[in-house]
Amino acid sequence: MRLLRSTCVLAWVLVTVAGVVPAQTPTTVPSPASVLGFEPGTDRQLMDYGQLTEYMKQLAAASDRVEIRAVGTTPLGRTMYVAFISSAENIGILDELRGINKQLALDPDLTEEVRASLIERGRVFVMETLSMHSGEVAPSQSLPLYAYSLATTDDPELLRQLDDVVLMMVPCHNPDGMDMVVEHYREYVGTKYEGSSLPRVYHKYVGHDNNRDFVALTQEDTQVISRLYSTDWFPQVLVEKHQMGSTGPRYYVPPNHDPIAQVIDEGLWNWSAVFGANLARDMTADGLQGVASHWLFDDYWPGSTETSHWKNIISFLTEAASCKTATPVFIEPTELRVRGKGLSEYKKGVNMLDPWPGGTWSLGKIVEYELSSMASILATAAGNRRQILTFRNDLCRKEVEKGRTQAPFYFVLPQKQTDPGELAALAELLQLHGIEIDRLTKDVVVGDRHLSTGDLVVPLAQPYRAFVKEMLESQRYPERHYTPSGELIRPYDITSWSLPLHMGVTSYQIDTRSTDLEDHLEPLPSDAFEFDLTLPDDVWAIAYPSSNNQAYLAVFAALEAGFEVGRIAQPFGPEDRELPAGSFVILMGSGGRDGLQSIVDQTSITPVVFENEVTVARLPVRKPRIALVETYFHDMDAGWTRYLFDTYGISYLVLHPGDFDTANLARDFDVIVFPGASKDVLTKGKYKRGDRYVVNDYPPEFRQPITRKGLAKLTAFLQGGGTVVSWGGSTGLFTGGLAAPDGDDEDADAIEIPVRDISDNLEDVRVPGAFLAVDYLHPHPLTWGMPAHGGAFSRGNPIFATSIPRLDTDRRVVAVYPERELLLSGYLEGEDQLQNKPAMVWVRVGKGQLVLYGVRPQFRGSTPSTFKLVFNALLLPPIG
Ligand SMILES: [Zn+2]
């Protein structure tokens, strides 16, 4: 059997190298070269998404072993597909096989007879998502060769494998990014910038963070992929295909390194290890050196397997070493190195048995590794068909049984919430994930908990129990060490993703089973959060509470449409619905009832309706003219901020650092927003690594910094009454003092502000990304709608210290890390040093206002509980 596989790989290599189509190929099935005009994997040649999908469509039309289906749309409007590859017989009954998958995945109560029949008739569905990170081009470029070989093979062993397995190949996980990267590569090929990185994010918004979006599912393309495995096709195996840096091992296969997510069943880890061991064996046998495992990538956070691991899917990622997009690189043996946990030397060892010795590394080589990898995954799935299908239903039974016998038994999301719009959003998100949610039909008491009719209940006795538990609890990072009492194994990425905490939804768990509760549950109706409100013709105004994110959606729509909007500075109580300080009143005025009605229809919460004029003091709210600063350095945080603004209907213009010289800040803008970006990138157009500056490979027009002149303008903008909003690394533009203002006085001094960043002095504070307790100052226009005691997502820096202001400046600490337990979810070191430090500071400079955040208010679009901190900054009243 090994010989047969090797022969296949050899055939692919011949195709790649010589462009020769094997003689046995039926002429009716088009080869990749015949459609694309070149062999995939050829140096300096890339197909774009249109070519890739055109080839797959032609292949599907010509081959009864291939079917392609449209499955959704990307954020920029491209159609996403999945290509099913299997035997003609399986392709003919895909939807019947899908039904078998669903029963095995979701039904814990199958009779033994039915179960045995399903396992007998079922096929292993292996879903492979290719090139989600668009600079990692090879997996998508490999697919036409792989699909063509399977469509045309007459190898008996491969045909047997296709009888047992249905491949679900997602030709490209990120079609928008693929076209951006290919277009950029083609533009610069043959110039000194050939193979340079794309100067912007390779996605409408989020770039490389797209695999960090699989909990919050904010982006259309991540939703499409999630639906495929969570609710539509129920594959038993999922593989994400990536690439990594150039100078380490050549290919990464599972198992991953510790720590691992504790709630995931041990059987899933064993299965991914089986696939990994076979990958290492098969690829090495194919003559491919440098396959490594159990290194760098941990399996604690959801990014490496989307969330499929929590949904009983055997899942893992692979990573190939990169060349420069499609341009070969030569790697000196002396340049080979390893980093991260698990490999300490670039030497032969148990998890890298045959180190690659260096040399030329090209797209064709990566394609060869991918083809070998895909072949091994198919062989493992086929060789274990019955066991894998049995395991999937075993796991369904096991998880449901745990939910019936082990606490917690239910999570409750009370109907009464400070921000009911976020409750609706959470329920919708859980359903998108394939989670069963119920609603209580009467009041019930369980222990000391009084549950009310209409409260939402998420039972743990469901197949995706692990997901429910992980996402509705708060996280505790599993602390593991390299040696007993030795160094802690640090997390690969963030450590908190608790949905209730991040979204600001109150929830609690119940650790006692209750038949009274279970007897009074109904499935959450699809229209549970819909409401029907028709405004009277002569309505005076509508009002939304400042504690609701949806209020801001309504207000930005109202401002856009020209309605008069005011904020009430004091709590105001119309009958049973008190509006907290900072709530919004939108007057019908000349805007008309229909316009106001359309605002009501856009939001998911009902406003308070004032039919007659009421007397209440209101601060006028004006539509802010906003500049959003985005660098070309794959600026994901700026992308997430654009996403936030677009989602809430907030108008803005993007300013790149090089635009500051010519922009008229004072004339054109009221607010300038600096998302998290390195100060060095902003002001020097390059990164700092240690003491050394690293020049990026972008063409120079994408490396323009904010010059001294631009910084002086920024100071003048502030002093003249503008608002500047900044978090993350960009706060370094301000905490070190402001540049002297733009003006005639060349000897003007730099301006100190009464806030500095002391994180460099607090080296023991480590926050890899956690949700921490934060107290908010009230009353203050920046904290309107926020609780007095709440939380925020933090990555540890900056950490501020304030001082007594001088020279026409002022400051207020509007949020502080309190002197109580700080860690609400995730991992934190140095808590005592962080306590009683400002988490957010308002600063006055002349007539202007500067808002500095030590926390990340819109982190990866996943922290709605603190979005208001951004919205309030955009709407700050001018200094009176
Ligand atoms: Zn990647």
Image (spheres, rainbow, N blue to C red):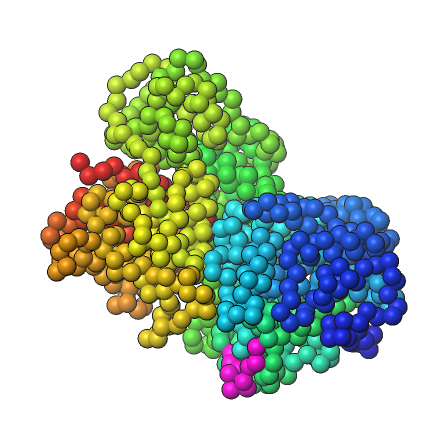
Q: Residue 135, located in which quarter of the rendered image?
A: bottom right
Residue 226 x %, y %: 61, 49
- Of residues 347 and 743, the one drawn nearer to the viewer in this rendering: 743
- Of residues 57 and 649, the one drawn nearer to the viewer in this rendering: 57
Residue 655 x %, y %: 37, 51
Q: Is residue 3 left or right of residue 468?
A: right
Residue 174 x %, y %: 59, 54
Residue 127 in view, yes or no: no
Q: Residue placed farthest to the front in the image?
A: 190
Q: Does 813 sit above or below residue 24?
A: above
Q: Residue at x 58, y 84 (%)?
A: 358
Q: Is residue 873 left or right of residue 201?
A: left
Q: Is residue 196 left or right of residue 359?
A: left
Look at the image and tell me in which quarter the C terminus lies: top left
Q: Residue 126, located in which quarter of the rendered image?
A: bottom right
Q: Which residues are magenta?
A: 329-338
Residue 861 x %, y %: 45, 48
Residue 763 painted magenta? no
- Of residues 725 and 212, the one drawn nearer to the viewer in this rendering: 725
